[in-house]
Amino acid sequence: MQVEIGALVHKDCGHQVLEVLQGIEGVAATYIEAGRSNDLFDDRQFGEFGEASIITVIADEAHKEAVFDQLHRACGLEKSARGLIYMTEPVLRCSL
């Protein structure tokens, strides 16, 4: 089975994540979207809103902890409050 690992992080993290996760064992797919947030960041380029990266990683359940840790480090979340990261329970069915 697989899990979804997601992150809502500062816009600068998006491309770093792609580079880091492309060689990690257990990563089935990585998706990055751009968005705006009015409550996650102090840095707001658009008045009330700041740009954010919305990251979704589909990972094998056996490697979920390693992938989660790599995503956490790639986003720099151990140093500052630049967003949040979460992991779902195993996904029963996933079509890629």
Image: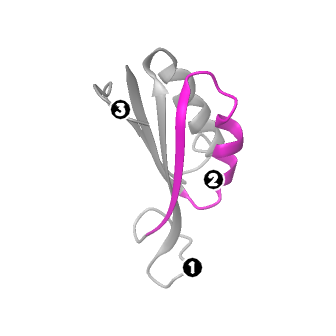
Residue 93 shown in magenta? no
Question: Which residues fall within the magenta stretch?
Answer: 10-36
Residue at the (63%, 37%) spot, across then down: 73
- Looking at the image, tell me whether mark 3 or mark 1 is earlier in sequence order: 1
Q: Is residue 31 above or below residue 68?
A: below
- Looking at the image, tell me whether mark 3 or mark 2 is earlier in sequence order: 2
Mark 3–mark 2 Cα distance, whole angstroms, equals 26 Å
Q: Quadrant of residue 11?
A: bottom right
Quadrant in which the C terminus is drawn: top left
| Image position, residue 69 (x, y; %) | 56, 29
- Looking at the image, tell me whether mark 1 or mark 2 is earlier in sequence order: 2
Residue at the (51%, 72%) spot, across then down: 50
Residue at the (31%, 28%) spot, across then down: 91
Q: Nearer the viewer, residue 49 or 6?
A: 6
Image disc number at residue 45: 1
Say which element carries label 2: helix
Q: Is residue 2 above or below residue 50?
A: above
Say which element carries label 1: loop
* Label 2: how many Cα within 10 Å (few below 14, some 14–19, many 20+): many
| Image position, residue 56 (x, y; %) | 47, 44
Say which element carries label 3: loop
